[in-house]
Image: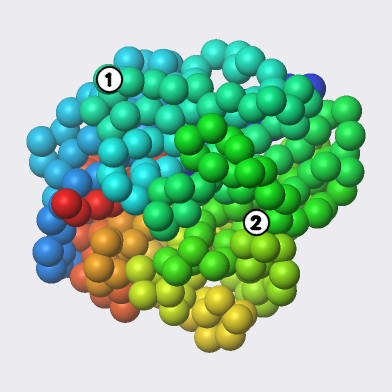
Amino acid sequence: MDRSRSSRSRSAHTFVPALVGLLLAAASCSSPEKTTTAEPTSTDGQIVFLRSDQGDTQTIYVAEADGSDERQLTGPGEYCCLLRLSPDHERLLVMPGGAPPLPITGGVLSVDGSEFRLLETSDPTLNLVPQAWSPDGERIAFEGWDETDPSRTGVYTARASDLGDLVRVTEYPGRRHDMPLDYSPDGTQLVLYRAVRAEPHFPIDIGGSLWVVNVDGTDLHRLRTPGASPWWWARWSPDGTKILFGTERLQPIGALWTVRPDGSGLTKVFEDEEGRFPTGPTWSPDGDQILFALQPTNDPFVHNPNGFYVIDADGSGLAPVIVTPDFKGSPEWWRE
């Protein structure tokens, strides 16, 4: 994401986040023998993630957090993107495969893959791509835009049940997008990626910045990340003190970083000694570890084989989780 824009649909009227498949996208890893220095401290729980082939056909899988007991959840191409797992661990935000109906809204898939519900809106022109659940699971944050009225571009939130009580959080008029990435653990703020390029100009995911805003739209402020070049994937730490993100693609060197919500304390957490490119980082449920993909190149849109790895929150103890000859991305980690 990827997306993992993460796998994004690029057309005159579709701007599906790469998160979306991008969702972090691809890349390859060295062989398992070359990987690692330590065993993870306690990779318990479960993970859900995307697998993708070279043609970008995506399939959702679940597994134990140590990489064992993989199970295929959906058919190839049934859904194009895995976005987020709900706080109750029962629902997934996804984008259906194929051409989505307009306006674009995405949908909710049960975590066992048995039930899908398309999110429906009464607004005939406002596209709403779901990107993050509120901590109580009652609301969803959306990447919003209107092809007929560029002044409507921005972040929106709405009730998860029926998309009622639509609230506009940011205003970013034009063809460049604001993409919400995560709620703060207390539900009062959102971290978002603000693009500097617009569809169909490519790459649109280069040169953007991370921002934090209150859910009522107040106190919008940019996170200063000199030298870090953030991509459009970020996750709030479970204790609320840090925001985790990776270097944008096409940079010569990739790394994982944290920064405080007020923009202070920028810290490089991890850089691979073998020069591989880390993408799609997510916290363990207790915040003690970080799960991410290691790519062989700096362009995760190229879906080469890669691997999932885990480190301790301080960047130490790199250990493999799933290293297989295919592309994997968009990991989510939970414990019951």
Q: Position of residue 119 (x, y in %)?
A: 54, 27
Q: Which mark is residue 289?
A: none
266 relative to 75 in the view: left or right: right
Q: Residue at x 89, y 34 (%)?
A: 149
Where residue 12 appears, as percent x and y from the top left, is 79, 22
Decide: is 124 above or below 67. Answer: above
Residue located 13% across and 68% down the image: 41
Q: Across the whole image, how many numbered discs are drawn on residues?
A: 2
Name the quadrant containing residue 48. top left
C-alpha gap between disc 2 and disc 1: 32 Å
Q: Residue at x 60, y 29 (%)?
A: 105
* Depth order, front residue of 77/118: 118
Q: Is residue 248 visible?
A: no
Q: Can residue 314 be seen from the camera position used here? A: yes
Q: Which of the two discs, 2 and 1, labels the residue nearer the N terminus?
A: 1
Q: Amino acid at mark 2?
A: Tyr
* Label 1 neighbour load within 10 Å: few <14, some 14-19, many 20+: few
Which secondary structure lies at badge 1?
loop
Q: Which residue is mark 1?
A: 114
Instruction: Identify the image quadrant of residue 282.
Output: bottom left
Say few, some or many: other residues with alpha carbon within 10 Å of mark 2 (under 14 / 14 to 19 / 20 or more). many
Task: Name the residue furthest bottom.
Answer: 265
Locate residue 287 relative to residue 180 in the image: left or right.
left
- The label on residue 193 is 2
